[in-house]
Image (cartoon, rainbow, N blue to C red):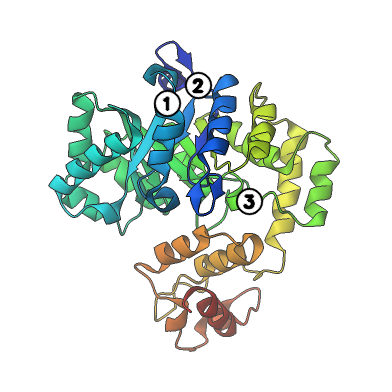
């Protein structure tokens, strides 16, 4: 795809597909361990990796300053790519956006960001960005040379993504939660969102490729499948799976130890795309994960249309399954996404219509109570 050449290269600098996500940094006594982080940054750069991703709220608002102290003070600006984000809870009007952006430049110790993303976009948050002219402000900052590329990170359904991309043609890149477990998850729609990005020719940055560590701590049955390939760590299969898609130009890894970094560098230094055996192995692992002590919902959605409280039952079950399987903190976020304009699990009036039509004969009324205990306590 021709457009990707613009994003693989910055001047004479070619970007490798592994990015350093600065949301899970090495910590010591509740502070970022700068000594450890400097070693990680130096090792990363030494092997030709150059992409760093931060946001104002990461690590209790310590991430940007850590990036300044451990990266930007120590390397020439042209030697690295830096992404930052505009998060909705830090602004209420256009002037706030300009002030926040100025603070972010100062906190990171730079004069411009290579990528600036509208952060954690959903159908609920998008109107605020529009009302406050966030996209227009970003475009002005781009004209001024303070932003090189405008994008957004996204956490909602594919139809919402398509609507935003239609309305905001200045968006150049999209950051998605994408991994082999969420690939066909009905509450996240990773692959459907990826296809929308392909349709609109928007390169993709991947977040959560190992699902917050969930795709490292696999059940023994799943580990055995990967072990038989004798090709690397469980993290390597998760990250290489993402990097093998042609429209994905960067895969972020939230590395908090030098050991994690060494593992990632080992298989991404000379990246090779997935082969047929590896794709088949991932399919087998995905099926194992789907049936790991979870609600056996097939997402046929027969139950949704007749629900008097408009509860998106399969999506809430999917969030519940992810929470149980992976201890995934993002499940709470997606529960919010799926209940923002629909009923919550606790809204169930126990009419039983869903159970009468469920092909799997699930005790949906009881299961919704379990979901409410997990997400609404």
Mark 2 — residue? Answer: 15
The picture quadrant where one finds residue 264 is top right
Q: Mark 2 and mark 3: span between their CA atoms?
A: 25 Å
Q: Residue at x 59, y 45 (%)?
A: 179
Please state which of residues 104 and 197 is positioned toward the viewer in this rendering: 104
Do the residues bearing badges 1 and 2 touch, measured as CB atoms within 8 Å?
A: yes
- In the image: residue 365, left or right of residue 287: left
The residue nearer to you, when weighing 292 against 100, is 100
Task: Tell me how far mark 1 sits from mark 3, CA to CA.
Answer: 25 Å
- Where residue 218 sits: x, y (%)? 73, 54
Q: Earlier in the sequence, mark 1 or mark 2?
A: 2
Of tags 1 and 2, the one toward the viewer is 1
> Mark 3 packing: few (<14 Cα in 10 Å), some, or many (20+)?
some
Q: List the residue tagged with mark 3.
A: 213
Q: Pick whichever, 133 or 95, lies toward us.
A: 95
Decide: is 344 above or below 128.
Answer: below
Q: Can residue 245 be seen in the rendering of this structure?
A: no
- Please tell me whether residue 18 is drawn above or below residue 226 in the rendered image: above
Measured from the top left, where is residue 280 in percent x and y? Answer: 75, 41
178 to 41, vertically: above or below: below
Residue 242's spot in the image, x, y percent?
A: 59, 37
First along the sequence among labels 2 and 3: 2
Residue at numbered disc 1? 81
Q: Residue furthest right?
A: 228
Question: Looking at the rendering, which quadrant does residue 18 occupy?
Answer: top right
Residue 75, given in percent of the width and then of the height, sits at 43, 21
Residue 150 - label = none
Q: Identify the secondary structure beneath mark 1.
A: strand
SS state under label 2 = loop
Query: Label 2: how many residues lie within 10 Å, few (<14), some (14-19) or many (20+)?
Result: some
């Amino acid at each position: 795809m021709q457009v990707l050449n613009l994003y693989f290269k910055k001047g004479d600098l070619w970007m490798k597909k592994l990015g350093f996500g600065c949301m899970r940094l090495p910590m010591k006594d509740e502070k970022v361990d700068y000594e450890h982080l400097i070693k990680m940054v130096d090792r990363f750069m030494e092997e030709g990796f150059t992409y760093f991703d931060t946001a104002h709220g990461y690590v209790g608002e310590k991430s940007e300053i850590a990036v300044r102290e451990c990266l930007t003070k120590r390397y020439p600006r042209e030697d690295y790519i830096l992404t930052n984000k505009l998060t909705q809870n830090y602004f209420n009007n256009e002037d706030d956006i300009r002030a926040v952006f100025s603070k972010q430049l100062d906190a990171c110790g730079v004069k411009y960001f290579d990528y600036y993303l509208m952060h954690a976009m959903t159908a609920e948050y998008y109107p605020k960005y529009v009302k406050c002219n966030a996209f227009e402000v970003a475009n002005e900052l781009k004209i001024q040379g303070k932003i090189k590329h405008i994008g957004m990170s996204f956490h909602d359904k594919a139809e919402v993504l398509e609507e935003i991309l239609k309305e905001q043609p200045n968006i150049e890149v999209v950051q998605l939660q994408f991994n082999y477990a969420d690939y066909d998850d009905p509450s996240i729609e990773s692959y459907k969102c990826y296809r929308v990005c392909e349709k609109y020719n928007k390169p993709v940055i991947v977040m959560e490729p190992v699902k917050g560590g969930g795709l490292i701590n696999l059940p023994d049955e799943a580990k055995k499948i990967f072990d038989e390939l004798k090709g690397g760590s469980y993290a390597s299969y998760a990250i290489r799976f993402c990097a093998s898609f042609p429209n994905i130009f960067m895969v972020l890894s939230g590395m908090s130890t030098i050991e994690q970094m060494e593992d990632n560098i080992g298989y991404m230094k000379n990246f090779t795309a997935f082969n047929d055996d590896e794709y088949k192995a991932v399919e087998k692992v995905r099926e194992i994960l789907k049936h790991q002590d979870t609600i056996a919902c097939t997402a046929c959605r027969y139950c949704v249309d007749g629900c008097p409280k408009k509860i998106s039952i399969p999506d809430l079950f999917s969030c519940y399954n992810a929470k149980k399987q992976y201890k995934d903190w993002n499940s709470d976020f997606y529960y919010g996404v799926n209940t923002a304009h629909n009923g919550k699990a606790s809204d169930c009036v126990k009419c039983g219509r869903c159970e009468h039509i469920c092909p799997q004969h699930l005790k949906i009324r009881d299961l919704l109570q379990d979901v409410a205990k997990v997400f609404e306590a």
